[in-house]
Image (spheres, rainbow, N blue to C red):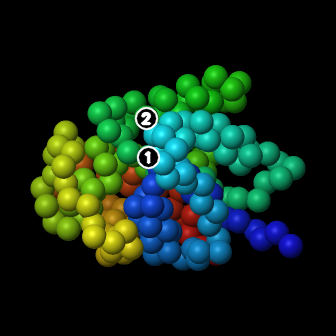
Amino acid sequence: MSRSVQIVLLCEDSQHEAFARRFLSKVGWTIRDIRVEKAPKGSGSGEQFIRNRFPIEVKAFRSQKHHVSIALLVMMDGDQKGVEGRLNELDNACRERDIPPRSSDERVLVFVPTWRIETWLAYLEGEAVDETKRDYPRLRRKRDCRQHAETLVSMCQNNMLRQPAPSSLVAACEEYNRWNSRLQRR
């Protein structure tokens, strides 16, 4: 018996997975609602895995015959390319496979922490951050991001990011708010 997946999470690594799961949990989703496609450890670039897998997931998401999910959430580091650079790469990956890039009316959300998610975590702990700096500390345990994710959900829902907010986090809140009512658990 197959289970009904509501959200597909496409991510680079375990920290992205932990953060996204906690983010989605805060808005009412359970672990059973989420199918995770994560870059296999030790198999190369997580960013490359996302670029290769994104068109496949977009095509599956759009398939009316097998439409089982209501949203696709992608989480990938911006590194030196930033949000726009990564979005362009994903659009190009789709075009290379003759798949139209995502449109603004689709429930395909892309979160791009720049440089890395640790930038967001530092900001959500109250630090002033610089997205050109890439050496923010990692959490000791991936699951310790629960409060960070909950803080971000609250900030996004209330349109109250502390200033100055990293531009990649502003973009993520805009992505989330675009689909807030549709992503919340019914």
Residue under pointer 2 = 86
Instruction: Locate the N terminus by quadrant.
Output: bottom right
Q: Image height check: is 19 above or below 146?
A: above
Nearer to me, 181 or 23: 23
Asked if the residue under mark 1 is in contact with the one under mark 2, i.e. CB atoms within 8 Å, the reply is yes
Mark 2: amino acid: Arg
Q: Residue at x 34, y 65 (%)?
A: 152
Extreme residue toward the front, this view: 42
Q: Image height check: is 184 above or below 167?
A: below
Q: Measuring from the top left, give residue 185's x and y in whole percent.
A: 60, 73
Nearer to me, 180 or 172: 172
Q: Residue at x 54, y 51 (%)?
A: 40
Label 1 CA crowd tier, 10 Å (few <14, some 14–19, many 20+): many
Q: Which mark is residue 76?
A: 1
Q: Which mark is residue 57?
A: none
Work out whether residue 154 can be spotted.
Answer: no
Q: Measuring from the top left, give residue 35's x and y in whole percent.
A: 64, 63
Q: Residue at x 49, y 29 (%)?
A: 89
Q: Residue at x 49, y 68 (%)?
A: 21
